[in-house]
Image (cartoon, rainbow, N blue to C red):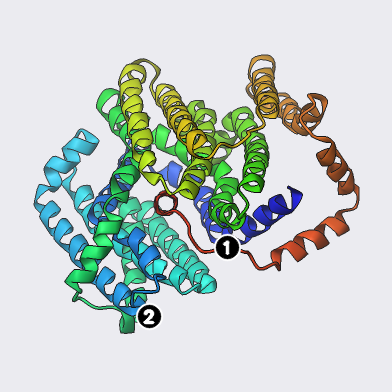
Amino acid sequence: MSGYLRRLATTGAAYTAANILSKLIAVGLLPLYTRYLTPADYGAAEILFAAVVSASIVIRLGVIEAVLRFYYKPDEDPEAVVATSFAALFWFATIASLVALPFAGPISEALLDKPAPDLTRIAIGGLWIATMHEYLLTLFRLEERAKAFFVVTIVNVLAAIALTVVLVVGRDEGARGLLLGSYVSGAVVVLALIYIHRRRLSLWFDRVLLRRIMRFGLPTMPAELSLYALNFVDRIIIVRTVGLTEAGLYSLAVKFAQGVNVLVRGFQLAWPPLAYSIRDDEEARRAYAAVVTWFMAACAFVVIGMWLFSRWIVRALAAPEFFDSYEAIGLLTTAVTLYALYMVLLVILGRTGRTEFNFPATAAALAVNVVLNLILVPSLEIVGAGIALVVSYLVVIALMYRFTQRLFPVPYEWARLARLLAVSVALVLIGEVLLPTSGAAGLAGRIVVWLAYPVTLLAAGFFSDEERRWLRRLRHPAGLVAEFTAASREAPAVDGAIPEAYEVARIDEDSTA
């Protein structure tokens, strides 16, 4: 199993570079933003950003997801697929934006519980920009132009940050500055990408081809929308029950919780090719079980750290009025990890070809999320929303586990997973109950507890004999580096068949970065 784990780690690290860099830059600027924005302003901007992603899922009607499949089909013309899909998305996004503009006032009252038509009009323009930007970046992925994808992503992030700093800090534009900074720079990038891809694009579509594309893509939309709504509906309920200020604190906690995304993002990109490269079903079952165990062990280390250091993180990276956001960081980091586990199960479901089971699981989780938010948020505020999100992901995981075990049973290592959970909970409780919540002594004590994680796992009997032998090899790092380098040069034995539902969820995770 160590060969599969090495491949997963190597390819995951290669794929996630642009995402990590962009997130580090964004987090690094939080001390600046939070000192020039009130929690209410920050909450309003983040809610509208999330609303744009939700609306984009609807108006693209599964076209981007279908392109990833149709471009490689032997009986389709790739250039016709690109031309038709671009034309369809251009008109879908343009018409939807024009229809929404006259209703900017009512939309703002529904989302923000107050009239803010100017902010909503910017977000409606951003809807067109975000949809086209996602599609045009997808063309680089279709052509396997990883360098171009990386450069465009980083240029877009840097341009957005520069403009946002000017608007928020220099001109004190508040939430308006955050939205304009993101979408004006995004518009420039979209225009540049249209020019780069101009020979492949068209404003006219082939109706017959478009019907085939939409017949494939439309069924992905309900599961995609219900999954993303888990990360959107809670903010609306927070706004309607406890106000925009709490929504701003919750949105900041979500940003900090993305710390675990460094692992999750790389895993999301590396996992499907590895999962489908294993042809033998019995070998696949064993490998899936080992990957789940080790991935959860790696994520748990980050989750424990976010629980223990949440107060220090917020003090270091946010203005004092945002301090209470720390209360939800541990819960939200746990939720991000559970989301990654859901993605594992989604790929296993994709191996069976029975992806229709995805929507019932995500729909049930969404229903649970809404009910729990309505019950918990009025009294527990952002902590209640964090609890609701964790429980919702547990629901979707439980249902997906039941579906996948019926279709493709995997012998998960329950005893080891139980030890992992027990150690993680114990370390968090030790830190939160027994150690100070401020000062150098509290920080030092929590660092000791956090770094005790691998030793505690060893004492708890988590590691197998093979893994203990491998750990002893850490005393010779040069040999391990050579093995990882060799693994990265191996040609993956994959057929390119990545389940569309997985690709859908991954795309929208990118959109919320």
Q: Which of these two is toward me, 301 or 483?
A: 483
Give percent across and percent down for residue 338.
52, 35
Outermost residue to the bottom: 199
**Vertical placement of residue 308 versus 492, above or below:** above
User: In the figure, is residue 455 to the left or right of 77?
Assistant: right
Q: Is residue 185 visible?
A: no
Q: Is residue 126 above or below residue 427?
A: below
**What residue type is disc 2 on?**
Ile
- The answer to which image quadrant residue 223 occupies is top left
Please name the residue shown 45% across and 61% down the image. Answer: 157
Secondary structure found at label 2: helix
Query: Which mark, by number, is residue 506?
Result: none
**Which residue in the structure is indicated by mark 1?**
494
Dot 1 alpha-carbon crowd within 10 angstroms: few under 14, some 14 to 19, many 20 or more: some
* Mark 1 or mark 2, earlier in chain: 2
Residue of label 2: 196
Q: Residue furthest left?
A: 102
Image position of 233 with respect to 430: above or below: below
